[in-house]
Image (cartoon, helix red, strand yellow):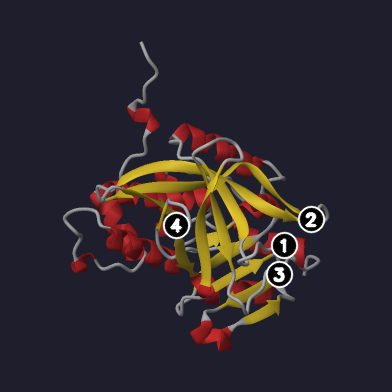
Amino acid sequence: MAFKYSSRHFFSPLTATQLSEYFSRINIPTSDGIPPKPTLSFLNKIITAHTKTIPFESIKNTFGVSETKIDISSIMQELVYARRGGYCFQQNILLCCALLALRFDVIPGAARNTTWDAEAREFVFSGFTHNVLFVSVDGQVYLADVGRRLVVAVGAVAIREGERIACAGGEVVEIRKGTLTGTGNWEVWHRRAPWSPKADGAELDAEGFTPVSYFTLERQTPQDYNLYNFYAVHSNEHIVKKYLMVGMVSETGGAVTVVGTVFRRREGENHRELEQIITIKSVEEFTKILETYFGIVLGLPEIKAAKLRFFDGK
């Protein structure tokens, strides 16, 4: 007898009703028609629509007002019916189940995020704290990821050395081969627009890129994701517990974010006049920005938590 995958090791596709409701949420009219077979253009259309309508948010995790569940019923309730956002596990599981319903060849994966340690002056990578999708179209494997907090690729990028794709705000993501934990692995690098330098002082390579994440092509199962999500929900060291983060693509293709009490809008070259940075000074301003730019309406427990954490209880 050998090890093998069983049905419990795979995610299930959305039902026809769920898929229709997901398309409605991301503003893709079903009347436009669905291609008879999976195509890269339709995959990119879904990713672009998703990143413009469903925000990344860590609000509930950061404030600890409820426990995040990642079964598809809970994800549909939160991201589709309640019209809230979510973090990577919620976002990419939803996309995964939608793509499976559309007969895409999808493998769930995991990645290690990198962060800049300003004191040590070096990048450090985490455990598996992020999930991604590997989607095969016409013999090529693509990285699909709608769950990044501040770096948003608006399409799938081919997993091959030097491949690049445009991101929100005139930014760029590049795929590079990686050997840090073994051969055959991959890295994601990111470059901001020339007029929008890295805000945290991180060191850049010769072309202005910084590392974002590190991944292998190993298939992950729902059980793996449940384990990673448990850490995200319960560990104060996980980034979605430590920092309040909200982000999505603007209607003009820029990136709008809230990190703590700082709102920032980064735009491409044609819309630079819309860029702004705001330090949020009250819970009223906080709730207004979240509703205006992200469509997020906070509940009373979240408003109370925001007052206590950021605004001295006022």
Distance Cα–Cα, label 2 vs label 3? 14 Å
Residue tagged 4: 79
Viewer can see residue 41: yes
**Above or below for 107 versus 153:** above
Q: Residues within 10 Å of mark 2 (few under 14, many from 20)?
A: few
Residue 87 at x, y percent in the picture:
54, 53
Kind of residue at badge 1: Glu
**Mark 1 sits on what residue?**
203
Badge 2 or badge 1: first in the primary sequence:
2
Label 2 with label 1: CB-CB less than 8 Å: yes
The three-letter code of the residue at mark 4 reads Leu
Distance from disc 4 to disc 3, alpha carbons, whole Å, reads: 30 Å
Q: Is residue 161 above or below residue 307?
A: above
Under circle 2, the secondary element is loop
| Residue 199, numbered circle | 3
Q: Residue 158 placed where, x, y %?
A: 40, 54
Q: Residue furthest front?
A: 206
Q: Quadrant of residue 82?
A: bottom left
| Crowd band around label 1 with a 10 angstrom C-alpha radius: few (<14), some (14–19), many (20+) | some
Q: Nearer the viewer, residue 202 or 92?
A: 202
Instruction: Identify the amino acid type marked 2.
Output: Arg
Choose the circle earlier in sequence order: 4 or 1.
4
Q: How many marks?
A: 4
Q: Are marks 2 and 3 in contact (CB under 8 Å)?
A: no
Instruction: Name, please, the residue furthest toward the right.
Output: 119
171 with respect to 199 (left or right) = left
Element type at mark 3: loop
Residue drawn at the location 62% of the way across and 72% of the way down: 287
Q: Mark 2 against mark 3, which lies toward the viewer?
A: 2
